[in-house]
Amino acid sequence: MTTDRLAQLRAMFAEDPTDLFLRYAIALELKSAGSMKEAAADLTELLLDAPDHVPSYYQLALILADLGRLDEAMTTCERGAERAQAAGDRKALAEIKELLATLHDEG
C-alpha cells in the first residue's frame, strides 16, 4: 500500500515540482516505508529550498534521532524552533522544544 501511495505522490509531484506539501508527504511516506536515509535526504533538500517549512524540522529531527544522529537532530530542532518562533507558530515551537528536551535527555 505504501508503495502505491508513494508512486501516486511522486506522480503528482512530477506534475507540480513546486508543491512543498507533496515533497513533505513523499518524505513522510518514505519514513513510513522504513527508508529513513532517503526521507532525511528529502527533508534536508526541502529545507534548503524552503527554510521556513517548520514541520520539516520536526520530522527531520525525529528521523535523524532514529538514525542515531543525535547531534544533528538537536541542531535541527534548534533551527526549527527559531523558524517556528519567527513564524509565530506556538504549537510547532512547543512540539519542537519538547522533542529537543527529549533528545537532550537521550544524549
Image (tube, rainbow, N blue to C red):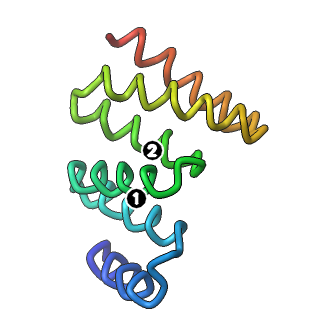
53 and 105: which is toward the camera:
53
Q: Residue at x 59, y 23 (%)?
A: 97
Count all numbered tags in the image, as a single digit: 2
SS of the residue under disc 2: helix
- Position of residue 77 relative to residue 33, above or below, is above
Q: Residue at x 52, y 67 (%)?
A: 20
Residue density around tag 2, few if under 14, some if 14–19, many if 20 or more, within 10 Å = many
Residue density around tag 1, few if under 14, some if 14–19, many if 20 or more, within 10 Å = many
Work out whether mark 1 precedes mark 2 in sequence or the reverse, and give the earlier one. 1
Residue 98 circle label: none
- Position of residue 39 relative to residue 84, above or below, is below
Identify the residue at the far front of this view. Answer: 49
Check the picture and name the quadrant holding the C terminus.
Answer: top left
Q: Residue at x 33, y 76 (%)?
A: 6
Q: Position of residue 55 (x, y in %)?
A: 56, 48
Q: Position of residue 105 (x, y in %)?
A: 41, 9
- Position of residue 57 relative to residue 46, above or below, is above
- Position of residue 5 relative to residue 104, above or below, is below
SS of the residue under disc 1: helix
Which image quadrant is residue 29 in?
bottom left
- Answer whether labels 1 and 2 touch (C-beta < 8 Å): yes
The residue carrying mark 1 is: 28
Going by the numbered disc 1, the residue's amino acid type is Leu
Q: Position of residue 68 (x, y in %)?
A: 22, 27
The residue carrying mark 2 is: 59
Question: Disc 1 and disc 2: Cα gap in Å?
Answer: 8 Å
5 and 18: which is toward the camera:
18
Q: Residue at x 49, y 21 (%)?
A: 100
Q: Does residue 38 appear left or right of residue 24 in this picture?
A: left
Going by the numbered disc 2, the residue's amino acid type is Gln
Which image quadrant is residue 72 in?
top left
Check the picture and name the quadrant holding the N terminus.
Answer: bottom left
